[in-house]
Image (tube, coloured by chain):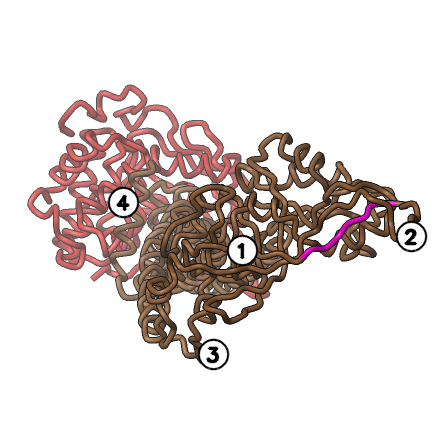
Amino acid sequence: MKAYDLVELAGRNLRESVLRNSLTTAGIAVGVASLVAMLSLGIGLQQLAGRRLGKAGLFDTIIVTSRRDFRALNREEARNGPPPAQSRALDEPARQEMERLPNVLEAFPDIRFISELRYQGKPHLTMVAGLPFSAKATDAFEGMQGNFFSSDAAPEAILQKSFAEELLGIRPRPGSASEETKVADLAKPLLGEELVMRYAERVASHSSGPAGESLVGAAYTVVSRQQALKIVGISDLDPDSMRGSARARLFLPLKLAENLHVMQPSDLRDSIRSFSNTTTYLTVTVRVKSPKQVQPVQDAIKKMGFNTFSILDATRSLRRFFAVLDLFLGIFGSLALAVASLGIVNTLVMAILERRREIGIMKAIGGSDDDVKKLFFAEAGAMGVLGGVLGVALGWGIGQIINIGTNIYLRRQELPPEQLWSVPWWLVAGAITFAFFVSLVSGLYPASRAAHLDPVQALRYE
Amino acid sequence: MYPGPHNLAQNGAIAVHPNGAIAIRTNDLCRHYLMGQTLIRAVDGVSLEIRSGEFVALLGASGSGKSSLLNLIAGLDRPTAGSVAVHGRNLAQLSREELAKYRLHTVGMVFQSFNLIPTMALIENVELPLRFAEVDRSRRQPLTRQALARVGLEGRLRHRPSELSGGEQQRASLARALVNQPQLLLADEPTGNLDSRTGAEVLDLIRGLNQSLGMTVVLVTHERALAERYAQRLIFLADGKLVDAQPNYPAPSMPTTFGDGR
């Protein structure tokens, strides 16, 4: 029988027992809907997590630390390279070498120190970080009030929101999101104001040590200094986000921060080693062109003899979690579809009993086993496709309702709305195809049973 | 005459005369089956020949094996022993697929209970064999209408079987049997559910097909009077065996009693 005849006959047969077939189709639709609902929730959550992390501009960032770093000692990756004492120092030549690696946008030292800042005569203690000029381009400072630094060495500062609150003496009660102060309100009294930063400068000393003893390694003097800074911006950047200069609440232009030669914890450590009077960096942040290149660049830097860390390492377990979550959601969704496929088997087996005589007639007038089989297949397939389409629509509808509900809840909590639900086109196509194939498989047994019906038995006068 | 370009009589394969080539030949044909512990010999060593264009009646009481024999000739059933050859092809050696093709193109069947598909309109019922034969859509409509016109049902195309009288239903099933232009028309008690007047009308139609198109007709009936009126030859069966085969008249000695039909 030709394909269009099969479709036509299957269609008219389905229309003949509308109630039973529409119930079966509804069963498939519910199965597909639950599959689509479960999977799109998984995908939506995954995209949500990805968006949040991606916004912080972190997927293209690698953090490089020296193997000499005491924090890296005894770490597993440290054991894979040369022993710490023989590994390279993380200094300016190393930074330049990293910058020359393919697909690297920039590599900048991570300068961070704790400092005392005076505002209107009152001291405040906080973590200060140097911020590369390139940070201007990333969306991390999207919600900032004021301006970015005017140049890479300008005596200017950008404050993190919570530090600005501290300067103004505002103490937000924890947990009361609704009473959170707006960044704009903080910016008004602070922008253009002056801060005085006190810090310890490391001054290289070329003289001999006390009492004329000869020096083994480097020697330096620590001098207390202060620097006036103009507040140019207030940022709402989350201090807990994992940006290279994380957890700092005051940002300086990177060049300025470098030129201050602030005493670093690594200086102390270096002083007990025999080499160099040159500055070494605690960490270097490497930015690559796209997240895809993180892995190869990371490998190249490891080969240079450094430890690396990227958000990709951290999200690897996250991605594994989502893969498992998707799998489980998919299994639960598929269970519903499996139940629905039993419905198809049942409907078709019933149809065979009911249409025994009809099958006998078709065979008597020249229908082959194959024709009968294909007809039952076509009926199963049609129910599958129809159920699949309805199911996708239903699943999408459920998703929309949950989305709207969630966003009403989020708005009540004064949180920005989120897209929890995502139904990508491949899920739509996949779900319908899956429903179609599940139906065909469900039709296998009934169809072959119908095909092998003995026409003489089927036609025996009742 | 069957109208249109698909005129059966133009088909050279059909012998119009009763004394033409052998259409059906059975040789020691058996169909035995087990019912519980009992071996039923539905057809038991039947050897007969039916020529092309012949109108033959198979007579016998209920359970005499005449329907079983017809099913074997129709290719609906397979013999347990012996052979049944139609136009020289031994049906026992055909695959299921080949048998379906044989039923589709060579055989037209008419049943006592009409066996029209109740959910389909007449025109769809008659069209069904053409769908199986993969005849082009454009050619199906005229063929279906011609077949229905031939049995006088051109005004009832869109009716469902339940909306028709018994005689009309049987004429529709005759149209369905005709539509693929078979050489063999096998009728299993076609008048069993009809009153004698409509029964006669149906048999008149069948005789018309036999005479104008040269179709070989095998009629299964237990109404001897009807058989004598329409068939050229009567074949008697009892307990699955051939009792007597003779040309119509002189009357044979009847081994069993027959119901009077109605």
**Mark closer to the observer (4, 2):** 2
Cα–Cα span, label 4 and label 3 = 67 Å
Amino acid type at circle 2 is: Ala
**Residue located beneath label 4 in the image:** A8
**Residue located beneath label 3 in the image:** A174
The answer to whether marks 1 and 3 mark residues whose Cβ atoms lie closer than 8 Å is no
**Mark closer to the observer (1, 2):** 2
Cα–Cα span, label 2 and label 3 = 56 Å
Q: Which range of residues does the magenta coloring cover?
A: A217-223
Label 2: how many Cα within 10 Å (few below 14, some 14–19, many 20+): few
The answer to whether marks 2 and 3 mark residues whose Cβ atoms lie closer than 8 Å is no
Whether callout 1 and callout 2 share a subunit is answered no
Which of the chains bears the disc numbered 2? A
**Residue located beneath label 1 in the image:** B33
**Mark closer to the observer (1, 3):** 3
Which of the chains bears the disc numbered 4? A
Whether callout 4 and callout 3 share a subunit is answered yes
Secondary structure under the numbered disc 3 in the rendered image: loop
Percent x, y for residue A451? 45, 49
Cα–Cα span, label 1 and label 4 = 39 Å
Percent x, y for residue B168? 14, 51
**Mark closer to the observer (4, 3):** 3
- In the rendered image, the quadrant that contains the C terminus of chain A is bottom left
